[in-house]
Amino acid sequence: MKKRLVATALASAAIALGTALPASAGTTDTTGGTGTQNCISRSVSRGEGHGWAQTCDGRNVSGWIQDDRADGRCPYVIAYHRGGGETAGPRVGPKGKRIDFNFWANGEVSDFGIGYSTC
């Protein structure tokens, strides 16, 4: 009887521990119909704005970006490429405007960031 209670308690603790651990910061692995794809998704922000971007095939980038300040600067998502280089997404402005985007990166995406330019 004691062995059964201990085994049940250990199993419950393992399940609770497994669901309580956080996922890796912003990177998600998903399984597709033909195999495993590594999706990269990130929340990005800086003073000028914030947004979110994702790619699952390494090139097609989708997400959204919002302008948070009336400062004459328009934020955009940056897709950083493996081995160097970057592709800039569409700019958004004025303050309060939010857009959804979908763009093709010029190289295989390894991470995302946020930039800004004059509107």
Image (cartoon, helix red, strand yellow):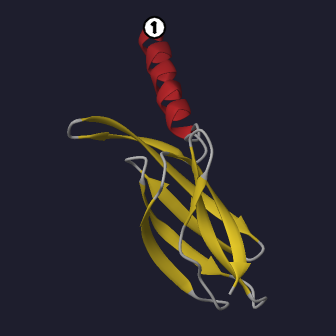
Residue 3 or residue 41, whichever sits in front: 41
Residue assigned mark 1: 3
Q: Secondary structure at mark 1?
A: helix
Q: Quadrant of the C terminus?
A: bottom right
In the figure, 96 relative to 56: above or below? Answer: below
Q: Relative to residue 16, is residue 45 drawn left or right?
A: right
**The N terminus sits in image quarter:** top left
Outermost residue, left side: 33
Question: Can you say whether 39 is above or below 34 in the image?
Answer: below
Name the residue at 78% across, 74% down: 47
Q: Residues within 10 Å of mark 1 (few under 14, many from 20)?
A: few
- Residue at 41 percent across and 12 percent down: it is 4
Which corner quadrant of the image does residue 60 belong to? bottom left
23 is higher (above) or lower (below) than 100: above
* Number of numbered tags placed on the structure image: 1
**x then y, percent, for residue 99:** 50, 81
Q: Residue at x 51, y 32 (%)?
A: 18
- Answer left or right for 44 relative to 47: left
Q: Position of residue 23 (x, y in %)?
A: 55, 41
Please state which of residues 13 and 119 is positioned toward the viewer in this rendering: 119
Q: Residue 114's x, y, as percent?
A: 67, 64
Amino acid type of the residue tagged 1 in the rendering? Lys
**What residue is at 47 percent from the left and 44 percent from the top?**
28
53 sits left or right of 119 in the view: left
Q: Quadrant of residue 104?
A: bottom left
